[in-house]
């Protein structure tokens, strides 16, 4: 993104850039955030790493097949 912005500035464009933020909305008094749903099929030896990385992104494990 920085490369594109710098190129536009060099070409004479003026812009105002702010840090990214999560797009939220309110419905029924609750704040809603966008989410993505993923399905991961992997060997058992990789499960702990995948779950750990998803937890850093506020991931939620809904179910597992054992």
Image (cartoon, helix red, strand yellow):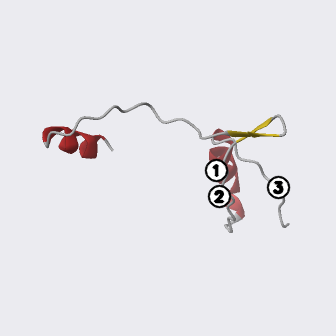
Q: Which mark is residue 66?
A: none
- Residue that mark 2 sits on: 46
Of residue 63 and residue 32, the one placed in the foreground of this image is 32
Image height of 2 relative to 16, above or below: below
Horizontal side, residue 62 vs residue 46: left or right: right
Residue drawn at (26%, 46%) of the image = 4
Of residue 26 and residue 42, the one placed in the foreground of this image is 26
Mark 1 closeness class: few <14, some 14–19, many ≥20 residues within 10 Å: few
Percent from the top left, x then y, of residue 53? 62, 46
- Which secondary structure lies at badge 2? helix
Horizontal side, residue 65 vs residue 57: left or right: right
Can you tell which of label 1 and label 3 is closer to the viewer?
A: 3
Percent from the top left, x then y, of residue 47? 70, 56
The quarter of the picture where residue 17 lies is top left
Image height of 42 relative to 30, above or below: below
The quarter of the picture where residue 8 lies is top left
Q: Residue 49 carries which label?
A: 1
- Which secondary structure lies at badge 3? loop
Of residue 55 and residue 44, the one placed in the foreground of this image is 55
- Residue that mark 3 sits on: 62
Residue drawn at (27%, 41%) of the image = 5
Could you give the CA–CA distance between mark 1 and mark 2, rounded to whole angstroms? 6 Å
Mark 2 closeness class: few <14, some 14–19, many ≥20 residues within 10 Å: few
- Which secondary structure lies at badge 1? helix
Residue drawn at (66%, 56%) of the image = 36
Residue drawn at (65%, 39%) of the image = 24
Given contact means CB atoms under 8 Å apart, are the residues at marks 1 and 3 in contact? no
């Amino acid at each position: 993104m920085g490369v594109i912005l710098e190129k536009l500035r060099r070409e004479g464009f003026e812009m105002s850039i702010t840090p990214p933020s999560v797009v939220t909305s309110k419905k029924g008094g609750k704040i809603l955030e966008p989410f993505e749903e993923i399905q991961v099929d992997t060997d058992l030896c990789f499960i702990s790493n995948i779950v750990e990385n998803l937890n850093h992104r506020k991931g939620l494990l809904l179910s597992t097949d054992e």
